[in-house]
Amino acid sequence: MIIDLPSTTTSAVNRSLVDLRERGGTVALGRVLTMVIVTDESSAEEPIAAANAASFEHPCRVIVVGRGAKRGSPRMDAQIRVGGDAGASEAIVLRLYGELADHGASVVVPLLLPDAPVVVWWPTNAPDVPAEDPIGALAQRRITDAAHQRRPLAALERRLTGYRPGDTDLTWTRITNWRGLLAAALDQPPTEAVTSAVVAGAPDSASTDLLAGWLALRLGCPVSRKKAGHSGTGMHSVTMNRTSGPIVLSRPATSTATLQVPGQPARRLALPRRSLRDCIAEELRRLDADEVYAEVLRYGLPLVAKPGGNTTSSKVVEASR
């Protein structure tokens, strides 16, 4: 069910929600959190679909703040989605115009679920310091996505300089399966130290940089970041060199990866690119600070040798101190 409320107020939205519960049996009981999605008016549908799908695992109230044109008089158009149009959540889509477009926090606060954690997600452009953003300051957990910004690697640097406990980025979430497979491969005999590693991925893949930083931090050996493929193709391969030979996990262009371990036949493993729904569902499983992500940003990235033999930029090195 979808209800449109043009030129409305937060009081009218709340009254409509109460009326829906009384007339149609739609209830907010059991909602475990409030998710606020901050995006442009024209790019809200994909994040809403991902949040709705994730809501079957994490029932929540979804509040979408869509920033429209700043010209003209202040106005808020609202849309309430419940039932099949909102998964296991209830979605409130707010489109803000005029001066109101810069004051999203003032319309979000009256719609938050009482005594429930708040998660804020910026699917595209995010503030340099999410925790200091008026909406971000309301949240226990703040999710950004460097991959969907114009310059992903520069955005990753800003994630470090603006990091506060509770921040995370979906470029980190996308490599969870890669990290699990690599850790499992190292658990197999023979038990040997890794002497060096090479992580290859697309030139604009921030996830590749984070995986290289994670390996450098955890393995304590030289790690190089190499370019492979074209922009938008993501992670390609990881090679971990040991005395007995290299362990290679590669996914050239399909959803199937190949794992090569010395003395064993090559194995093909399912390793598809993670959907937005899966990434959001994973991030909603925890509301505390992701300490591993913070350590990789602060200490792992400066250890990685970039293409051309350089380490990471001076901004990242300075911010990690």
Image (cartoon, rainbow, N blue to C red):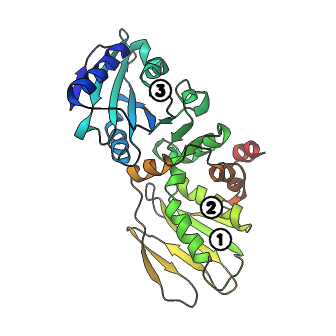
Of discs 1 and 3, which sits in the foreground?
3
Q: Residues within 10 Å of mark 3 (few under 14, many from 20)?
A: few
Q: CA distance from mark 2 to mark 3?
A: 41 Å
Q: Looking at the rendering, in which quadrant would you find the C terminus? A: top right
The residue under label 3 is which amino acid type? Pro
Say whether residue 12 is visible: yes
The answer to which quarter of the image holds residue 244 is bottom right
Residue at position x 37%, y 34% in the image: 29
* Quarter placement of the N terminus: top left
Disc nearer the start of the sequence (1/3): 3
Q: Position of residue 67 (x, y in %)?
A: 40, 24
Q: Quadrant of residue 309?
A: bottom right
Q: Which residue is mark 3?
A: 114
- Residue 204 in sight in this render: no
Task: Say above or below: 270 vs 166.
Answer: below
**Label tally:** 3
**Element on which disc 2 rests:** helix
- In the image, 74 versus 6, the foreground residue is 6
- Label 1's element? strand
Where on the picture, by quarter, is residue 97? Answer: top left
Q: Which residue position is annotated with label 2?
A: 212
- Other residues around mark 1 within 10 Å, as few (<14) / some (14–19) / many (≥20): many
Q: Position of residue 277 (x, y in %)?
A: 38, 50
Q: Is residue 313 above or below residue 29?
A: below
**Residue 92 appears left or right of 258:** left
What residue did someone put label 1 on? 197
Residue at figure coordinates x 41%, y 53% from the top left: 278
The amino acid sitting under disc 1 is: Ala
Q: Which mark lies nearer to you, 2 or 3? A: 3
